[in-house]
Amino acid sequence: MKFFGPRGYDDLQLDIVGFLAILGESSVLVQSQVAALSWFFLLPRLVPAPQALIRTSRPERLEPTTGKVVGAYSGGNRDYVNHLAHLLHEGNSLPAYSVRCEKVTSTSPSSDVKAKLFGPITWLSILGFFMSIALCGLAIGLDDGFALVAILALSFLSTLVGIGNRWSLKLKKRVASRAVPPSDVVINYPNGSFLIIKCDEYTARQLYWHPEECEYMVSPTVYRAISLCGTLILMFGVICLGNATLNLQVGFAVSYIILNAAYWVVAALPPQWNWDLSYYHVQSIKYEGPEQMQTFTEALWKAIAITQTAHWVEVGSIAPVSKGWASWIKEAEERAKTEPAVWDEKDMVRGFPEWNYNAALTEHLEAASSTNTV
């Protein structure tokens, strides 16, 4: 007796193959926004889980990251980090209680940010396109009309939803030319790390202050009509797929398994691999001592010493709010200004003030506690 019964290839049931066509929604959504920046997004191709791209509404801006952005001298304050700024500085790589200093400059007059021409998402589109071509040829060769209609419907569905989701990103430019305070920015991430950025006002407004709004190719009304048509085409394509012959269903199953695996791999890659951020040049600024500190207090003191001001600490509500902490921050700023660190010609920060910040914090907290109890 055979373990799976007396069945051969012709008895194999693949009616569930239509279900494979709509699996993998999360891996498609992860890269859908940057993918829609590329013209390859309009290629007619097989896409796993195309319903992930058929939504009732589109994102109005790029998704920000949790963190605090504060102007070191300007007083600006944001409770989030813009998406491109987070990618540019690789904020995910900052260890807890670390302090990193970088200088950002623009490298060309254009301010367009695009998807990489031949990034990982481009190769996904090309892979889906050639799989669609191969299955089309197989369906024609085997005289499978249902399979051919399913391939054409599911392939051109990707072009249709691509038109609905196609967008561009135009970073805002500074219009006024009035004098402003230095534009350096401090980013404080939830893990207690600090990122200090030296930049001019134009770069600061583009990356850290202005919202990253999506300018779509079609209006919301047209997009909703596209979503409705796309939904109907998807259902029609899946029905035709379920009526294809066994050979073509096997081909579809193999194609969607490969595509789902490929989309999952690309979704796991660093998102910077898909963005063309060559418009900006990031230079690391070194300073004496290690980048990663042992405590939040040490990291905060090092950030104050580098910026030589504690104004941003109060504006961004970075430190605990108490009399003890307020007096410690005030002394830290005085120390940073009295014995300022030096920025040399090689963009190296040298000569931090010698100060026992831990002992000073203990004294200020004890003094505030004794005052409260009296």
Image (cartoon, helix red, strand yellow):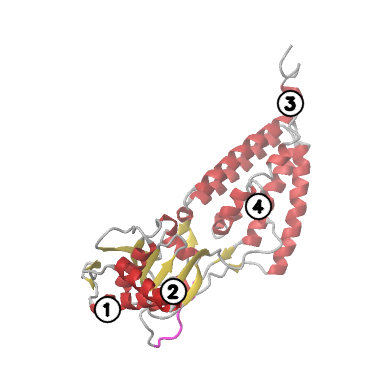
Amino acid type of disc 3?
Leu
SS under mark 1: helix
Where is residue 226, by image quadrant?
Answer: bottom right
Magenta segment includes 175: yes
Which badge, 4 or 1, is on the more N-terminal residue?
A: 4
Task: Determine whether the residue tagged by mark 3 lies in a helix, strand or loop.
Answer: loop
- What mark, if any, has residue 87 been given in the picture? none
Q: Quadrant of residue 243?
A: top right
In the rendered structure, which disc, 3 or 1, sits on the residue that comes first in sequence? 3
User: Which amino acid does the dot numbered 4 rest on?
Assistant: Ser
Q: CA distance from mark 3 to mark 2?
A: 62 Å
- Label 1: how many Cα within 10 Å (few below 14, some 14–19, many 20+): some
Magenta region, residue range: 171-178
Is 185 left, or right, of 308 in this rendering?
A: right
Q: Which residue is mark 2?
A: 70
**Residue at mark 3:** 12
Q: Quadrant of the C terminus?
A: bottom left
Badge 1 is on which residue?
337
Q: Residue 24 location, x and y as percent?
A: 63, 45
For the residue marked with disc 2, what is the amino acid? Val
Q: Is residue 42 above or below residue 210?
A: above
Task: Looking at the image, tell me whether mark 2 or mark 1 is earlier in sequence order.
Answer: 2
Cα distance in 3D space between marks 4 and 1: 59 Å
Kindly report which numbered mark, 2 or 1, lies closer to the viewer in this rendering: 1
Q: Nearer the viewer, residue 265 or 96?
A: 96
Please name the residue shown 60% across and 40% down the image: 131
Q: Position of residue 346 (x, y in %)?
A: 22, 67
- Residue at the spot of label 4: 158
